[in-house]
Amino acid sequence: MLYVPVYTTGTPYKTYRVEKGGYVAHHGSINSVPGKGEVFDLYATLNPVQTPAPIGGDVGWYTVHANVDGATVMFDNEVEGTISKGVLSVQVYTTGTPYKTYTLTKDGYTAYTGSIDRYPGKGETIDLYVTMNPAPAPTPKSPLSPVLAGCALLIVGLLLAAGRKNN
């Protein structure tokens, strides 16, 4: 219980908050102001913070083999690390939610995404092999399309010919 004196002529409070470590904070609204000598009761129920059970148990691994060092490896869009000396080993708990996809990316290379159809058991390693290909070089664009360039040359030629006739 906490008593908080307020001045009836002061700026009225609109909300209140009650918090304690290990509990979910409570927020409440204050809809009216107490008059002189009045007491308003405000109530708060604090609930313990729910902490998820840690993932644990047996461990397995995915080993990603790739031809490009420095490629970023993601499992279901979560970065797991980078390829070094052609490999990256990723530890997983056998009781965790199974991954569905793996993706490798690196500037200058086409991204690679593959499906994961096996989940490792206790002490097991599943090898995933990737060959990354260089990204295609962008095709330089002509400032004018060939048809437009041809039409422009034709017009210039006709103007020059007309200018010679007039001279």
Image (spheres, grey):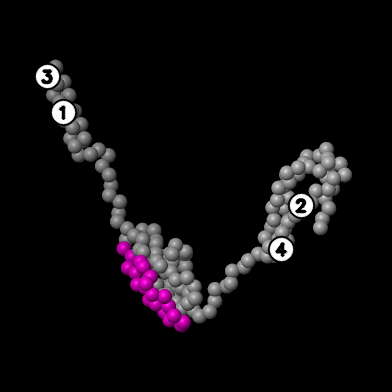
Q: Which residue is mark 1?
A: 157
Q: Which residues are magenta?
A: 114-133
User: Which residue lies at the image location 86% right of the left edge and 41% below the top edge?
Assistant: 36
Asked which quadrant contains residue 26, the reply is bottom right
SS label for mark 2: loop
Height in image: 43 above or below 167?
below
* Residue 86 in view here: no
Residue at the extreme bottom of the image, as rendered: 123
In the rendered image, residue 135, in percent from the top left (x then y), is placed at: 32, 58
SS label for mark 3: helix
User: Which of these two is toward me, 104 or 16?
Assistant: 16
Q: Nearer the viewer, mark 2 or mark 4?
A: 2
Q: Which residue is mark 3?
A: 165
Q: Is residue 79 left or right of residue 38?
A: left
Q: Nearer the viewer, mark 3 or mark 4?
A: 4
Mark 2 / mark 3, whichever is N-terminal: 2
Query: Mark 3 to mark 4: distance in Å?
Result: 96 Å
Q: Which mark is residue 42?
A: 2
In the rendered image, residue 147, in percent from the top left (x then y), is placed at: 19, 37
Query: Mark 3 to mark 1: distance in Å?
Result: 13 Å
Q: Amino acid at mark 3?
A: Lys
User: Which of these two is toward me, 110 or 95?
Assistant: 95
Q: Is residue 17 left or right of residue 138?
A: right
Determine if the magenta segment contains residue 118.
yes
Q: Amino acid at mark 4?
A: Gly
Mark 1 / mark 4, whichever is N-terminal: 4
Q: Amino acid at mark 2?
A: Leu
Query: Mark 1 to mark 4: distance in Å?
Result: 85 Å
Q: Which residue is mark 4?
A: 21
